[in-house]
Image (cartoon, rainbow, N blue to C red):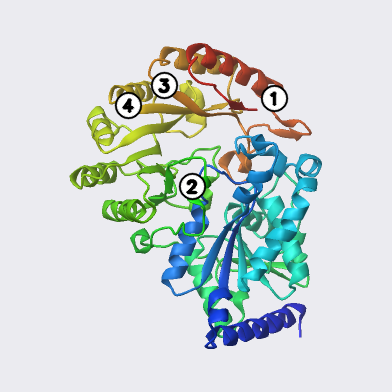
C-alpha cells in the first residue's frame, strides 16, 4: 500500500466514523458536528466580510452540507496594534517573509493556537482555506497547527494562490518568487483545488461520505511519494443564475468598517490586459441575469437590513444591456439602495445610461484608465481610447456619479513622454475625477501576459525589483511621487495614496 493509499484509507475511516456519529439521534452531535469549515486568514480586508467563502457557504448549505465560515483576519485586526498592515494596497508585511517574521509572527503565535481550537471545537470533517497572496503565509501556519492537533483532519486549499501554485508546479509556468513545494509534498494540504469551488466541494463531500478516494476530483493538485499530480481541469459553471445568494450569517456585520455589502454579479472580465492575472484565473466572462441580481439585492435588504452595496465584479458593465436591465428593475421596483462598481471605459457608457444608473442608486464608478498615453495603452492591450475615456469620465460627473480612476505607472514600455501624457490627462480632467482609487507601480504577475513574456520586454529581476531599459524601481518610485504631488495639488479634499 502506497503512502497516499494509506493516508486515504485512514481518512476514509475517520470520515465514516464522523458520519456515523453525525447520523446518530444525538442533539449534541447535531449541534456541533460540521461537514466543512471555510477559513479566511489574515491579511484580508476588514471593510466587509469575505465574499468568496460566503458564496460557497450559500451553495453548500443549499446542498444540505453543514458549513461554517471563519474570518480570522477580522479577529486579528481587532487586537493588532498597527492597523496599517491591513491596507491591502501595501500587503508586504503579510507577503514578504522577512517583514512577516519581524513585524507579524511574534504577535500572531497565540492566535494560531486559539483559531485551531475554535475550528476543531466544531468537529469539522474538512477544513478549506481561501488562499490569496496576502493570506497565504498565515494559512500555512494554521494548517500546520491543525495537522499537529488532528493528523487525520482533511485540509484543502482553493482560490487564486491555489491556481497559481498549480500552474507553477504542474504547468511549468515560471514563478519569480520562491515556491515552497512543501505545501503539497510536506502535507500542509491534502489537496489544492484549481478552479471554481462549488461543485468541487460537493463532489469531495460526496466521495468522502461513500468512503471513496477524494483525490480523483477534477481540478485537484496533490502529492504521492513526493511526486506532484494535477488532475484534469474542472469545467466552469455554465449558469450563474443557479447559484444561491451569499450567506453572511457567521459574521458580526456591525463590526466591519463599511456599511456596504459586497455583491458579485459576474465572473471574469471582457478585457485581457497584459498586466492582469484575473483573466487566466476566470478564463471567460460570465454573468448573472438582471433578475438574479435583483433577487440577491432583495435578499440582503430583507435579511441583513442593508441597502448599500459594493459590486465586486472585475467588470460590472461587461454587457451594457444587462446594466440597463438591472437599473430598470431597481427603478421599477422602487428599491431604495446605493451602490458602486468597477467599470470598463466602454463606448456604451453614454450619458443616457449613466443618468439611468444614477437614478437606480449608483454613487460611484471606478474606471481603469491606467495611462494617458495611447502608445502605452496599446502595449497594455487596453481597449481604452483617450478621447472616449475623457468623455465617459465627464459624463459620469455630469450624471452626478463619482468617477474614480485607476492608474498604473512604470509599464515596461512607458517613456518619460508617455508619463507626462498621464500627468497631462489628470490635470486636464481634474474637475471631473473624484479620486484615484488605486495608483500603483507596475507589478509583474507570473500568470499575466507580462509575466509570461518577460524576455520580450527585456525584464530582469533583481533584489530591489524588476528592471528593463525603460523602467526601474527608482524610475517608478520617482514617477509615483510626482503623480501623488500633482494629485494632491489638484484634489486638496482627499489624500491620494499610491503604491510603490
* Mark 4 or mark 2, earlier in chain: 2
Q: Which residue is mark 2?
A: 254
Alpha-carbon neighbours of circle 3 within 10 Å: few (<14), some, or many (≥20)? many
Please identify the residue farthest to the front as the structure is shown.
27
Res 433 label:
3
Q: Position of residue 210 (x, y in %)?
A: 55, 85
Q: Position of residue 265 (x, y in %)?
A: 38, 50
Spatial separation of the CA atoms under disc 4 and disc 3? 9 Å
Spatial separation of the CA atoms under disc 4 and disc 2? 31 Å
Alpha-carbon neighbours of circle 1 within 10 Å: few (<14), some, or many (≥20)? some
Alpha-carbon neighbours of circle 4 within 10 Å: few (<14), some, or many (≥20)? many
Q: Which residue is mark 1?
A: 472
- Residue located at (61% from left, 70% from top): 122
SS at circle 2: helix
Spatial separation of the CA atoms under disc 3 and disc 1? 29 Å
SS at circle 1: loop
Res 396 label:
4
Asked whether the beta carbons under mark 3 and mark 2 sit within 8 Å of each other, the answer is no
SS at circle 4: helix
Spatial separation of the CA atoms under disc 4 and disc 1? 35 Å
* Mark 3 or mark 2, earlier in chain: 2
Spatial separation of the CA atoms under disc 3 and disc 2? 31 Å
Amino acid at each position: 500500500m502506497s503512502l497516499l493509499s494509506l493516508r486515504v484509507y485512514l481518512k476514509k475511516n475517520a470520515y465514516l466514523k464522523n458520519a456515523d456519529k453525525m447520523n446518530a439521534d444525538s442533539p449534541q452531535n447535531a449541534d456541533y458536528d460540521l461537514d466543512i469549515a471555510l477559513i479566511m486568514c489574515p491579511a484580508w480586508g476588514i471593510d466587509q466580510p469575505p465574499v468568496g467563502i460566503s458564496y460557497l457557504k450559500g451553495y453548500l448549505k443549499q446542498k444540505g452540507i453543514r458549513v461554517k465560515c471563519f474570518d480570522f483576519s477580522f479577529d486579528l485586526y481587532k487586537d493588532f496594534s498597527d492597523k496599517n498592515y491591513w491596507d491591502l494596497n501595501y500587503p508586504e508585511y503579510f507577503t514578504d517573509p522577512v517583514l512577516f517574521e519581524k513585524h507579524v509572527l511574534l504577535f500572531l503565535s497565540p492566535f494560531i493556537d486559539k483559531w485551531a481550537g475554535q475550528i476543531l471545537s466544531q468537529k469539522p470533517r474538512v477544513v478549506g482555506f481561501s488562499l490569496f497572496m496576502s493570506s497565504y503565509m498565515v494559512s500555512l501556519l494554521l494548517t500546520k497547527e491543525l495537522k499537529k492537533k488532528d493528523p487525520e483532519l482533511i485540509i484543502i486549499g482553493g482560490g487564486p494562490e491555489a491556481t497559481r501554485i498549480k500552474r507553477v508546479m504542474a504547468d511549468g509556468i515560471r514563478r519569480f518568487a520562491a515556491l515552497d513545494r512543501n505545501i503539497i509534498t510536506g502535507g500542509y494540504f491534502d489537496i489544492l483545488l484549481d478552479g471554481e469551488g462549488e461543485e468541487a466541494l460537493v463532489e469531495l463531500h460526496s466521495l468522502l461520505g461513500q468512503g471513496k478516494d477524494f483525490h480523483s476530483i477534477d481540478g485537484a493538485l496533490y502529492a504521492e511519494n513526493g511526486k506532484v499530480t494535477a488532475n484534469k481541469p474542472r469545467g466552469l459553471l455554465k449558469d450563474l443564475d443557479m447559484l444561491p445568494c451569499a450567506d453572511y450569517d457567521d459574521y458580526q456585520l456591525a463590526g466591519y468598517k463599511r456599511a456596504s455589502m459586497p455583491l458579485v454579479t459576474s465572473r471574469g472580465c471582457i478585457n485581457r490586459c497584459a498586466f492582469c492575472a484575473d483573466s487566466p484565473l476566470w478564463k471567460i466572462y460570465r454573468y448573472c441575469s438582471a433578475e438574479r441580481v435583483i433577487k440577491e439585492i432583495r435578499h440582503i435588504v430583507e435579511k441583513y437590513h442593508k441597502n448599500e452595496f459594493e459590486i465586486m465584479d472585475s467588470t460590472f458593465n461587461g454587457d451594457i444591456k444587462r446594466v440597463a436591465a438591472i437599473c430598470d428593475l431597481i427603478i421599477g421596483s422602487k428599491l431604495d439602495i446605493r451602490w458602486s462598481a468597477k467599470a470598463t471605459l466602454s463606448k456604451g457608457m453614454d450619458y443616457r445610461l449613466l443618468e439611468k444608473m444614477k437614478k437606480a442608486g449608483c454613487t460611484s464608478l471606478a474606471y481603469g484608465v491606467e495611462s494617458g498615453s495611447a502608445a502605452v495603452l496599446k502595449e497594455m492591450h487596453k481597449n481604452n481610447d483617450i478621447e472616449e475615456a475623457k468623455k465617459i469620465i465627464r459624463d459620469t460627473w455630469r450624471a452626478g456619479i463619482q468617477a474614480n480612476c485607476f492608474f498604473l505607472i512604470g509599464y515596461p514600455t512607458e517613456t518619460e513622454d508617455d508619463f507626462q501624457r498621464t500627468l497631462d490627462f489628470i490635470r486636464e480632467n481634474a474637475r471631473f475625477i473624484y479620486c484615484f482609487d488605486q495608483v500603483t507601480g507596475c507589478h509583474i504577475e507570473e500568470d499575466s501576459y507580462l509575466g509570461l513574456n518577460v524576455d520580450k520586454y527585456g525584464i530582469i529581476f533583481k533584489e530591489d525589483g524588476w528592471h528593463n531599459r525603460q523602467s526601474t524601481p527608482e524610475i517608478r518610485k520617482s514617477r509615483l511621487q510626482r503623480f501623488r504631488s500633482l494629485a494632491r495639488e489638484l484634489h486638496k479634499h482627499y489624500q491620494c495614496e499610491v503604491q510603490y
